[in-house]
């Protein structure tokens, strides 16, 4: 590298972090349009907006999404929050010395004084006393076991104080539903939220570490199939309004806690028989989460997986009935779907209906929306038994697909560029800019004087539709010159007639 290049490199050392990106105009106009239409469509289905924090306790995501899932085990951005205020147990500590210090810290910080933490502290004290008794008896085995138990509880206390950037929104929506006693509102409660999510994934086209979701959740009420079908109808209507191309909906039912465990065992047994022919990821998943093997995209595994038992043949009668109902309700609404028995989704909270929507122009990351029913989640988080269903759209992918189909926002230039010369003209120009903007026009007012020729060139570059020419002559006569840049036509107006003309010509 030449010295100059090295210097330039040195100066340019800040870049957006891998997997994150800046969204710039005019592209952001498309983002705004997408979000505005989402708000319109969702509002017409009775949804209200919820705005959520970007980070939450790590435990909320671990419990909801599942500790074994890729999202939680590998992809979360986690950091310590309140734990920094607790006395650090590292590098060496003794439970006897540490327990009172911890208790003191709990008392000093009301934030720690939760029922969960009080229970954990009591457990720590129990383990400490077992440990001390074992030491008196010189029972090395019992003392080492008590120490291990102590450390395990301590780790959950410290873990509970970890926070993570949200990888998705469903867990937070449920947390908010419980926290604000929304079960007391008329059910179901329909909420949507739009914002960034964070997953440490390998970046590629359509896959980012900071990405955006448009998320909608229906909480409470019944599990009537019409509920899932209406939700799916809503997202399909939204995509249609946007003109999204090649939209395909896949649906499945993954049963509930009655019937799914039996199917999972059957699947595990069948997969074990062909274990040697599967790759290391699938081999591991046979034990941790066999359903996820069905998700495999590996070419050489497809044939084997194709021969596995289908969950549809192992649903209990209630789930089978519910699934038939969802399909009937979709047909009633004219929503076309494809059944895909391998659609299991990567998050643990689902039961019964799951669905995914793909769109054109996205390559391998072509899922633009994913969702399903999650009836057990609210209880898992300590809330009342609550049925729920929802989806999240990957907004980045939605925009990519729209762009690939040529739906780029026209770079909207200014409506009016004010070319002014002279101090008096400037005073008028400042007023005119204010008035035109108040009337809804986009106006560019150069802050320093320019020759008219240069100003008109600048107006052209910015894509302005009109140039308003204000010089000494115009100010003296009260007649302003308006030039239509595309045609070069010029006309004279007084200030009020200028406004009328622009409004009639619909420049807003
Ligand atoms: P998910 O399938 O993990 O579901 O994500 C939903 C959508 O977010 C995906 O279909 C995809 O379009 C987008 N997405 C996910 N990860 C990335 C990434 N790294 N880069 C770009 N886009 C991405 C959920 O998140 C569930 N919470 C959906 C849900 C709501 N289920 C019930 N309610």
Image (cartoon, helix red, strand yellow):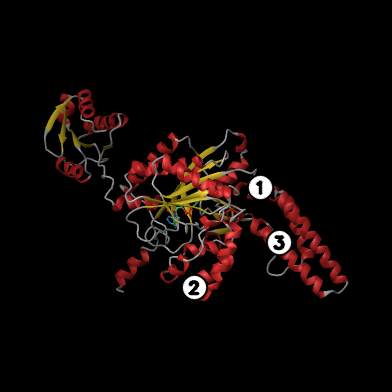
**Structural distance between the alpha carbons of marks 3 and 1:** 22 Å
Q: Is residue 134 above or below residue 206?
A: below
Q: Is residue 122 above or below residue 270?
A: above
N-terminal-most mark, 1 or 2: 2
Q: Is mark 1 within 8 Å of ligand 1?
A: no
Given residues 437 and 200, the one toward you in this image is: 200
- Secondary structure beneath disc 2? loop
For residue 382, which numbered disc appears in the image? Answer: 1
Give the percent coordinates (x, y) of residue 484: 15, 36
For residue 154, which numbered disc appears in the image? Answer: 3
Which residue is tagged 2?
A: 278
Q: Is residue 293 above or below residue 169?
A: below
> In the rendered view, does 360 fall on the left or right side of 297?
left
Given residues 231 and 176, the one toward you in this image is: 231
N-terminal-most mark, 3 or 1: 3
- Secondary structure beneath disc 3? helix
Give the percent coordinates (x, y) of residue 88: 68, 62
Give the percent coordinates (x, y) of residue 162: 61, 57
């Amino acid at each position: 590298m030449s010295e100059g290049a090295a210097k330039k490199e040195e100066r340019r050392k800040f870049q957006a972090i891998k997997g994150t990106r800046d969204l710039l105009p005019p592209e952001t106009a498309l983002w705004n349009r997408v979000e505005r239409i989402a708000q319109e469509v969702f509002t017409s289905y009775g949804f209200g907006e919820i705005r959520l924090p970007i980070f939450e306790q790590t435990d909320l995501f671990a419990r909801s999404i599942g500790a074994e899932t890729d999202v939680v085990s590998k992809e979360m951005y986690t950091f310590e929050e309140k734990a920094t205020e607790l006395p650090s147990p590292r590098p060496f500590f003794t439970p006897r010395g540490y327990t009172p210090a911890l208790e003191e810290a709990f008392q000093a910080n009301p934030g720690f004084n939760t029922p969960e933490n009080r229970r954990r502290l009591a457990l720590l004290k129990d383990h400490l006393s077992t440990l001390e008794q074992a030491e008196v008896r010189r029972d090395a085995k019992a003392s080492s076991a008590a120490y291990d138990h102590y450390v395990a509880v301590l780790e959950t206390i410290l873990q509970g104080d970890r926070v993570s950037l949200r990888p998705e929104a469903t867990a937070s929506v449920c947390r908010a539903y419980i926290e604000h006693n929304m079960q007391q509102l008329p059910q179901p409660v329909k909420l949507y939220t739009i914002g960034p999510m964070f997953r440490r994934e390998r970046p590629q086209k359509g896959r980012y570490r900071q990405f955006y979701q448009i998320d909608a959740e229906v909480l409470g009420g019944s599990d009537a199939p019409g509920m899932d079908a209406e939700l799916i109808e809503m997202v399909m209507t939204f995509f249609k309004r946007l003109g999204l191309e090649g939209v395909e909906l896949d649906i499945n039912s993954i049963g509930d806690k009655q019937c799914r465990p039996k199917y999972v065992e059957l699947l595990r047994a069948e997969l074990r028989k062909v274990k040697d022919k599967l790759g290391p990821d699938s081999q591991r998943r046979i034990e941790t989460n066999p359903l996820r093997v069905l998700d495999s995209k590996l070419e050489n595994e497809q044939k084997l997986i194709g021969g596995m038992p289908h969950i549809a043949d192992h649903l209990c009668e209630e789930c089978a009935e519910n699934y038939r109902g969802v399909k009937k309700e979709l047909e009633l609404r004219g929503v076309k779907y494809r059944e895909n028995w391998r659609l299991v989704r990567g998050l643990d909270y689902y039961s019964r209906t799951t669905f995914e929507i793909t769109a054109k122009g996205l390559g391998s990351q072509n899922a633009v929306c994913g969702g399903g029913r999650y009836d057990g989640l609210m209880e898992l988080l300590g809330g009342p038994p609550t049925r729920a269903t929802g989806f999240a759209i990957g907004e980045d992918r939605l925009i990519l697909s729209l762009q690939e189909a040529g739906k780029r926002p026209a770079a909207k230039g200014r409506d009016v560029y004010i070319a002014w010369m002279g101090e008096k003209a400037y005073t008028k120009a400042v007023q005119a800019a204010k008035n035109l903007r108040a009337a809804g026009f986009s106006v560019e007012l150069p802050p320093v004087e320019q020759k008219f020729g240069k100003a008109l060139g600048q107006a052209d570059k910015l894509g302005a539709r009109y140039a308003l020419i204000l010089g000494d002559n115009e100010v003296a006569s009260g007649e302003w010159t308006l030039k239509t840049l595309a045609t070069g036509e010029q006309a004279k107006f007084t200030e009020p007639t200028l406004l009328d003309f622009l409004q009639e010509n619909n420049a807003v």
